[in-house]
Image (tube, rainbow, N blue to C red):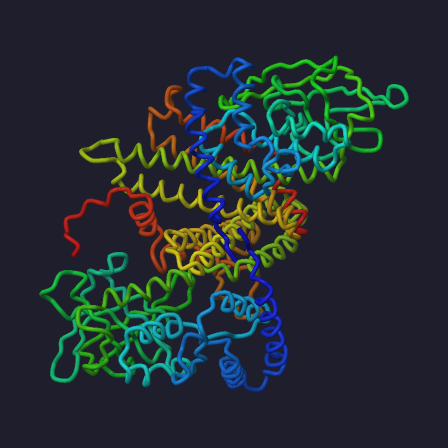
Amino acid sequence: MDLSYGSNMEVFRAEVRHFLTKRWSPTRIAEDTASYVRAFRADATKAGYLYRGVPKVYGGSEQAPDMLKAQVIREEFSRARAPSEVPGNGTTMVIPTLLQHGTDWQKQFFLPPTVLGDFLWAQGYSEPNAGSDLASLRTKGELVGDHWVINGQKIWTSHAQNSHYMFALVRTEPERPKHSGISYLLIDLRQPSVAIRPLRQMTGRSEFCEVFLDDVHTPADWIVGERGQGWSISRTTLKHERSTIGGSERNDETFLKLVSLARRRSRFGQPAIHDREIRQKLVDLESWILAQKASSYRRMSLALDERDEGLVGLVNKQLTTEIAQRVAAIAQELIGDSALIDPMAAKGAKRGDEKWLDQIMGSLAVAIAGGASNIQRNIIGERGLGLPRDLTLERDE
Amino acid sequence: MHFDYSEEHELLRDATRGAIQRINPLGLLHKGALANPAERRQLWRAMAQQGWTAMLLGEDVGGAGGSIVDAMVVAEELGATAFPLSFLSCNVAALTIAAFGSQRQQSLLPQLAEGTSIAVRGLSETSGGWEPARLQLTLSRAAAGSWTLKGMARLVPDADIADFVLIAAQGEHGPRQILVPMMASGISLRRADAMDQSRFLFDVAFDSVGLSESDFLGDTSAIATELDVASVLLAADSVGIARQLLEMTVQYTKERVAFGRSIASFQAIKHRAADMLVQVEASRVATWKAAIALRDRLPDAVAAASIAKFFATSAAAEVAGQALQLHGGIGFTWEHDLHYFLKRAKTNEVLNGPNAWHRERLARWLDI
């Protein structure tokens, strides 16, 4: 049993650090952040640190898969606060999907701009009547001549208002049963028949949208995989989504911010950090953070051994939710009266401790987004522990 | 990077399980067979035969030559079967003697390995904490080269069959560790009315027990190391308990029929079982991490050990509560085995320093 990465990796780590010291100087980016970041990403890709799984012909660095190297890169980039791949669905979902299932022209057309961040993607999965029960989705797609004609509505589509394209699950085979009637289509959002309406969240922000599709056209060959295969194709990507939401990267930072907050604020006439109850809650939180970190290592170790990860990924997502809720509970205790202030009222640096309300309210969403906790619990219970499935009126094919 | 059982660990785990099955500890507890000290001494020999009494001792003294990780593997299996003799206590005692004992004390080691001599370590102080300044046992100088020991060591496992007990006492210049021979005059024992029916715990009173220099070994630093080793083994015990409770719950809820179906098919049951699994797996990896940190002397070993202790023991107590809920009325009966595990889980929360103390220890380590 061993947690070390090995001496080869420590040599590699030094190389990565050296690269970052030379090429990432945030103090110099006052003039044009966007182009500095773009140039840095290009450098980092050329050096083999980013887009390692993407062939060079599509703009990636085409490196032999190496989980430990990838982990070291993640750690070092995070430590240096350097940007890694373009954040969002393009990197986490579209790229792996097209690499696995896309046709050559689809890869040639979509991958390079996605790698560069010039194409931004929205995920068109959930619908008002299809969230946890996604396979019951109703958005229809009909092949008319050389185009798909799509009608329906998507919801909770994060950042659709800023996206160029959407990858969507669409029902194209009405006579086939539930899961096998769905296809995976790519849609250009910049057409009049697409109406994007940002939805206002509890926090006051509008990060996700409704997307209305009213006789939207997309070329016939913008389908990924075969007709009716959309569900299994999307399973690959949803697996990726669950793993990224379950990640343990930002927790340490959050913990330190919470400690800072506790030092600043008072409780019963002394700095909250000296309050026994707060201290116990903080260390309890830290223990969950470290347990999740350990569980992430376990997951990595299983992947390195090419063994089935079983439930570890699902367990990790539950741990992430647990952590978010504990952070919220402590923050709520610490911010006192600031909890009465609208976190959207002031902007940027003028915001006081009410900015913690974003996290506090957001923690309520973590248990819903990317696979609702109770659905996850069902999966853990049924697939993990072998407990009998729910009774249902439908037959799943 | 291999954060999982090695093949050797899997073999060790399987061999341990097989040996425990043959011993059938719960069967022995049911029969009340172990109330008799002679029976427990015999069981102790069986333990020794498996190498369990000297896992951390070198092969040169008859030990298994194992690491804390190996001991952890065994500890989990013993927790999962509510094993009545204290693996933790004797291994910590043996380790301490090997590391800090005089030559004369170290000559005991082969006998500890064979199980012909028994040394146990007390895991609780009456003050409820482990601050050296608050040790309840006191030493005072009698004449040159001799001391007297006064006070009570509480909840010492298997003290009635032990030949030696390792305790910490407040000396004139700070805490000292002492390997007290149980034959010394002034020692009296009383079986503690412990809630935990799976263990044999004793309050040991020292009424001006005479000691000489040759009885001493180790000091504060030794105490801290033992604390960490004990924390990891106790955490592993709790992981085993939690794992077993989950398994019992899954089996029971699958079999139990209500409202025309197996109650395991109800979502409330499935969700609670899923939460229990998360607790088991989280405390498992926290314990693994602590064992590695201690074995490899990583800089965060102290923190990892305390985390494993409070995290795994709280988790097991929570899992026990859930298991009871899911078993319903039958789980609350004496006849059902669940209570052995639940009580053991709750006791683990308090042994080796209460969880609040371990949390505070972590807080200081984190510098908050």
Looking at the image, which is closer to me, B240 or A259?
A: B240
Q: Which percent across, then down, holds residue A31?
A: 58, 86
Looking at the image, which is closer to me, A298 or B27?
A: B27
Looking at the image, which is closer to me, A159 or B238?
A: B238
Can I make out residue B357 in this image? no
Along the horizontal axis of the image, is A155 left or right of B122?
left
Q: Residue at x 55, y 17 (%)?
A: B193
Along the horizontal axis of the image, is B172 left or right of A190?
right
Q: Quadrant of the C terminus of chain A?
A: bottom left
Can I make out residue A17 in this image? yes
Q: Which percent across, then down, holds residue A86?
A: 45, 76
Compared to A112, does A347 lie above or below?
A: above
Q: Residue at x 46, y 75 (%)?
A: A85
Q: Which percent across, then down, holds residue A309?
A: 39, 55
Q: Residue at x 71, y 38 (%)?
A: B99
Compared to A276, does A363 lie above or below?
A: below
> Quick one: which residue is furthest to the right in this view?
B144
**Res B160 quadrant in image:** top right
Looking at the image, which is closer to me, B59 or A369?
A: B59
Compared to B144, does A264 lie above or below?
A: below
Q: Which percent across, then down, holds residue A281?
A: 56, 45
**Res A95 quadrant in image:** bottom left
Along the horizontal axis of the image, is A309 left or right of A232?
right
